[in-house]
Image: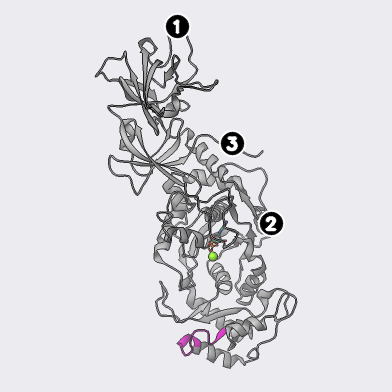
Amino acid sequence: MENETVSRNFIENIIDQDLKDGVYDTVRTRFPPEPNGYLHIGHAKSILLNYGLAREYNGEFNLRFDDTNPTKEKTEFVRSIEEDVRWLGADWEGRLFFASDYFQQMYEVAVKLIRKGKAYVCDLTADEIREYRGTLTQPGKESPYRNRSVEENLRLFEEMKEGRYGDGEKVLRARIDMASPNMNMRDPVLYRVAHLTHHNTGDEWCIYPMYDFAHPIEDAIEGVTHSICTLEFEDHRPLYDWVVREAEYPHPPKQIEFAKLYLTNVVTGKRYIKKLVEDGTVDGWDDPRLVSIAALRRRGYTPESIQRFVELCGVSKANSSVDYAMLEYCIREDLKLKRPRMMAVLDPIRLVIDNYPQGQTEYLEAPNNMENPELGSRMIPFGPELYIEREDFMIDPPRKYKRLFLGTEVRLMNAYFVTCTGYEADDDGTVRVVHCQYDPDTKGGNAPDGRKVKGTIHWVEASNAGQAVVRLYENIVDEEKGVYNKEDGSLNVNPNSLTTVTAFVEPALMKARGYDSYQFVRNGFFCADIRDSKEGAPVFNRIVSLKSSFRLPK
Ligand code: ATP
Ligand code: MG
């Protein structure tokens, strides 16, 4: 966001031209979510795009709930959406609106259209309307109610509003062109009767506006200049333009479409996520395996990493899919210098230093981040018994193995050189304890005689170690099989998407609180879970591992 991009995207080009031509003298954008679910990474793109444009042109960005559909909306979602938009850093500066607050104005526009002969009340059933609409190759047929007088239409529409008709008995339709090559222009429905209680307006209304009629009016009322939406609305643009023109708004907004963001092998559809939540595959809309904004936040993603990701995705007119690895790249890059590098052992075996004084503990200084001295240092306990990763010792190592095996010397990170002198294993070869000797002259990790070691391993001192639950994730869907089952369209769920282990961690980590994040040396970036961590008993979610084959495209 802070980087000046060399080439302007196509939306910026349109806005530049509009300002130059005096079509608008300011820029106002909006994010218009329907409060029927949690926001996901795709919405983040829309939010940051709209907010970014408003910022760039010194304009304004509105948050507006598109709550015209009374059946689906929930206040729980309103709350979560506000939280997510705020967290992403998109500031609506108090301009928070609800489309339902405009119901009266929408109704007045409908009356105006009737007066102009541009709308009529139609008694055809939904099935008949569909039948009359025709097909892509065949023009539609005009409704027998199309030529009702203005007076009759006004009276019937008023009666619709008063509740004289049941659901589906009558609709208000635009009077445009039943032969239009664009199906959306074949006398689309503007208002329907629905005896439903609305979360905001209660039982005040029993007629509700359709999306294609309501949305342009919402934009026009708020003085939105550029109404940015996704490609599936391209065919609806003539209707959008028709509504704002016939409603006679002085500075009508302009609709611009861009391609949705899709992530490879990732589920974003609300329908699928809802199913995963309902059947208990995940532990809620914010389960760290999902890509809802709430889930990404809980997993340990930062607003900066998502901003960077959206920026790298760019804005385009062509649908395409972005690799999840790019999102991981962004969080790794963001946290690399910002977070302390701590030691945690996820799959422990004991390391006993036989020549270290029994019962002694000393404190060694460890830099918090080798690449960022500003993070300072901390003191970590060291003693005769440590935990190291099981994979850092081998009885029978392959040729290039650089860690511990009989007779070799390695560096214990921030501590001493140790030489492996023996091990204890079960009959099946499972190693229990590794024995070694340390060289007291190598304190801090360097030998005075300049001798080198091939490997450095991390460790946690046993008597002071904390025990923490650590969760490791894989993709929630089975990438080999593909996201969706070819037969029934269900999700191919990966049974190994969550692994829980108990790790030994350095004592400082036991103070972690929800959202605190760290690099665990060699194991990745981890974040204390906001829901399951307790005071003194953190639960860590792995945000991302350290290694990746992902390279930023040139
Ligand atoms: P979904 O299809 O996931 O249910 P939606 O489009 O129904 O999402 P809305 O609340 O209607 O969700 O969307 C609010 C805004 O977010 C709209 O302007 C929509 O175009 C935009 N949006 C939704 N999904 C994406 C996406 N994948 N990429 C970019 N923008 C998106
Ligand atoms: Mg929608």
Question: Percent x, y for residue 414?
Answer: 40, 21
Query: Which scheme is used to colour this image of the protein?
Result: one colour
Residue 58 visible (yes or no): no
Residue 521 visible (yes or no): yes
For marks 3 and 1, give the CA distance.
Answer: 38 Å
Question: In this rendering, is residue 73 above or below 114?
Answer: above
Which residues are the magenta region?
A: 160-171
Check disc 2 and report the residue beneath it.
17
Question: In this rendering, is residue 47 above or below 396?
Answer: below
280 in magenta: no
Check disc 3 and report the residue beneath it.
549
Badge 1 amino acid: Asp
Seen at 63% across and 64% down, the residue is 232
Q: Which of the 4 image quarters holds residue 429?
A: top left
Check disc 1 and report the residue beneath it.
449
Label 3 residue SS:
loop
For marks 3 and 2, give the CA distance.
Answer: 41 Å
163 in magenta: yes
Badge 2 amino acid: Gln
Main secondary structure of the magenta stretch: loop
The answer to which of marks 3 and 2 sits earlier in the sequence is 2
Question: Percent x, y for residue 506?
Answer: 34, 30
